[in-house]
Amino acid sequence: MEIYLISLAAALVGGLMLSRVTKLLNLPAVTAYLIAGLILGPFCIGKINIPGLGFSSLEQIEGLTIVTQTALGFIAFTIGNEFRVTQLKKMGSSAIVIGILQAVITTVVVDLILIGLHLVRPDLISLPCAIALGAIASATAPAATLMVIRQYKADGPLTRLLMLVVAIDDAVGLLLFSASYGIATALAQGQISIMAVIVEPILEILLSLVLGSIMGWFLSLIELFFHSSTKRTTISVAFVLMTVGLSMTEFHIGPIHCCFSLLLVCMMAGTVFCNICKSSEDLMNRIDGWTMPLNILFFVISGAELDLEVLSHPVTILVGMVYIIARSAGKYFGSSVSCTLTKQSKPITDNLGITLLPQAGVALGMALTVASLPDGYLARNVVLFAVLVYELIAPTLTKRSLVAVGEIQIENHIHIHTHRLKRV
């Protein structure tokens, strides 16, 4: 236990120290935390195997799943708070259309390109693997996007639309993946399960929305028993922890396997809570301050668990580059088409797709599921490679897009930082 505590402390200190360097390079802090994780991980400092100094093995990192899952829960809860009725009246229908359409187009683009690669070089990638990767491509990681928005206090039409689209993307991605994985399994085994392709994914979404609604409603009721801001913050944190725990449970109803989506449950809880509780905005600001160390640990641990051994496989790099190019094109083209259909402004149309490039936790979870296919190891390695590239580059691209539309006042940010240095 003491080794875990020392390792977590080293992760926090390492991430924060490296963020000072990336600030000089005008890069988002998220990039610093991910690089710190790579440095402290089992493929760098962790190899020295000094107890407490970094993470010596991937098994040790897997033992910290509770930290990363909890951080994801708070991130999803925060994103759910963007679904306020006033906000939905302004752009709710547009966000839904964009969220669905860009995810579907991305999956179609990646499927077509990877299936084409299979037809040309069947020795590189199988048809089931190509179909599965197409669905995984639709997933967007909300964590990196949210951290960039928080760090630079971004605000404006693109930022608000982005938060809504990222939330919707999770539900759409879940359906696309479940259907595609069912088809891929049928191609590999010669049989298809309607239960796994249609019933279970829809039930997972419905159960997640119901559980999230109940938890958000209960939280808003219990908050009324407390008047102290500190106690209300504490009960809010406790309820998010409880929501994360409940969303990780699984059970069976006859032959049907039932489970929850952690992101959907926590997003729904945040949505219900923010629309019922009058003081939700103030409480969210307090929770954000409490969860900052948790979020830093999430990215450092995420960086540490990136398997650098995938870089030693030429096939992984080749298919991975095709996947990255196809997914990036799908996100950009899909967002542009859906923004044009919903009559968004040109700055939003040109930049939304770039802000949807980050990919991490959800995609890695899908890749672990796909690993059960005959050549699922390739899909897993390709996603690992893509996550490594996206997590290091995408936060900077997101920041640049938000600067381009004027929703990050970078000049003011630099001016404030310079003024502080002069005072010191």
Image (tube, grey):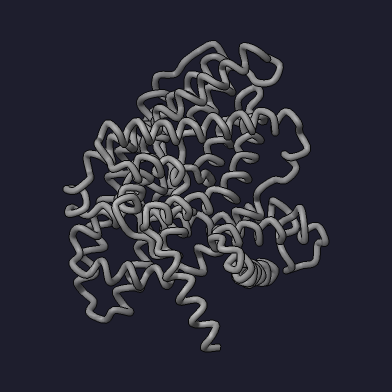
Give coordinates of residue 323: x percent, y percent: 58, 30
- Vertical order, 255 against 44 (above or below): above
- Give x and y (percent) for residue 203: 33, 33
Q: Nearest the camera: 228 or 23?
A: 23
For residue 374, what is the image quadrant?
top right
- Against 218, residue 116 (above or below) is above
Answer with left or right where residue 385 lies relative to residue 297.
Answer: right
Q: Judge left or right: residue 412 versus residue 210.
A: right
Q: Is residue 305 above or below residue 96?
A: below
Q: Residue at x 37, y 57 (%)?
A: 406
| Residue at screen point 50% across, 82% down | 420
**Location of residue 26 (image quadrant):** bottom right
Q: Give how far across and how far down residue 127 sits, in percent.
A: 58, 17
Q: Quadrant of residue 130?
A: top right
Q: Residue furthest right?
A: 48
Residue 256 visible (yes or no): no
- Whether residue 177 sits left or right of residue 264 in the image: it is right
Residue 141 vertical placement versus 97 (above, below): below
Observer-nearest of 351 and 203? 351
Where's the C terminus, which quadrant? Answer: bottom right
User: Total marks drawn?
Assistant: 0
Which residue is at the front of the view, 70 or 117? 117
Q: Can see residue 116?
A: yes
Q: Position of residue 282 (x, y in %)?
A: 27, 71
Could you tell me which residue is drawn at 20 percent across and 64 percent down? 277
Image quarter where the N terminus lies is bottom right
Residue located farthest toward the bottom when viewing the structure as drawn: 423
